[in-house]
Structures are given as structure tokens and as C-alpha cells.
Image (tube, helix red, strand yellow):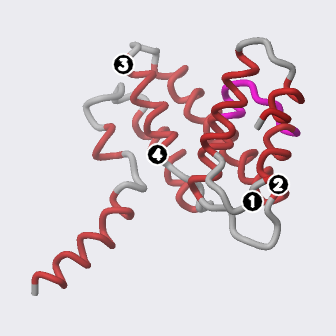
Amino acid sequence: MLRLALALALVAAPVASQTGGPRLAGRVPAAALPAIDSIIATAVAESLPTEPLVQKALEGSAKNVPADRLVNGVRRGLLQLRAARVIVARAVPGQSPPEGHVAAVSAALARGLPAPIVERLLTVAPNEPPGPALHAAADLIAHHFDPDSAADLL
């Protein structure tokens, strides 16, 4: 019985975390909540990670961003996740892009890492989690390294 309860909890947790509603209710402006929930539902339908969108909404709300700007920011996050999935699919063909890879690429793009550099770093180590390398490359570029030189270092 305990094993069954544990198994159900493990299966239910990812499904519950795919929607932002319960986590966002009362924490984002009520006027923005329906639109943000719709954007998150779109991400779920497209098999995109939703946590970056939830985090974007929470961050904007914590900064008292007006509802319309908050919705636009989350919408831009969805567009960035879509672009990230395309990059991951191109760099690692023949397999479904893992959510963690898509989220890491999206974060790297948001930090200004050029898409060709992201794709290059993904192809170098296709079976490794890309987050650390992308984060390091973005840090180097933020410190005025040439993007190609940053990729060469990694």
C-alpha cells in the first residue's frame, strides 16, 4: 500500500507542476492570471518546460511589473522556449529534445548567447547536460570574451 501511494505521488507531482495556477494564484495580479495560465497550458500542449514560465511570472510579480507587461514577458518566454527547442532538435537530431536541455538553451539565449554558439556547444557533447557549459559561455561573453573564443575554451 505504501509503495502504491509513493508511486502515485511520483507520477502526480510532475503533472501538478505543469500548471502554474496553484503556484501563481495570489502571487501574480489577478488580471494577468488567466492569460498566464493560457500561455502555460500552451507550453504543456507543446511539451515545453513550464517552470521557466512560472518563474518568469513570479519574478515579474515580485518586481511589481504591471499585468500587461507581465503577460508579455511570459509570452516572450514561451517564444524563447520554442526557439530553444528548435536549436536543441537541430543540434541533437533523432531524439526528442529533453525539457532540461530546452530550458538551459532558453536561459542561455535570454542571457545573450548567440544561437550558433549554443548549437555548437550542444553538438560537442550531445549526451551531456548543456546547462553548465552554456552558463559558463554566457558568463565569458558577459565579461567581453569573443563568443567563438568562449566556445573554444569550453
Query: Residue 86: in sight, yes or no?
Result: no
* Residues in magenta, as a range: 108-116
| Mark 2 → mark 1, Cα distance in angstroms | 5 Å
At x 40% / y 52%, what residue is drawn? 19
Pointer 1 residue:
126
Sequence-wise, the earlier of marks 3 and 1 is: 3
Please say if 107 is above or below 22: above
At label 4, the amino acid type is Glu
What is the three-letter code of the residue carrying label 1?
Answer: Pro
Residue 34 in the image: x percent, y percent?
A: 43, 40
Residue 62 is marked as: 3
Mark 3, other Cα within 10 Å: few <14 / some 14–19 / many ≥20: few
User: Is there a contact, CB below 8 Å, between mark 2 and mark 3?
Assistant: no
* Amino acid, disc 3: Ala
Looking at the image, is mark 2 or mark 4 earlier in the sequence? Answer: 4
- Residue at coordinates 66% horizontally, 48% vertically from top-left? 130
Q: Which residue is mark 4?
A: 51
- Work out which quarter of the rendered image holds the N terminus and state it: bottom left
Q: Is residue 146 left or right of residue 24?
A: right
3 vs 1, front mark? 1
Please say if the residues under marks 2 and 1 sit with CB atoms less than 8 Å apart: yes
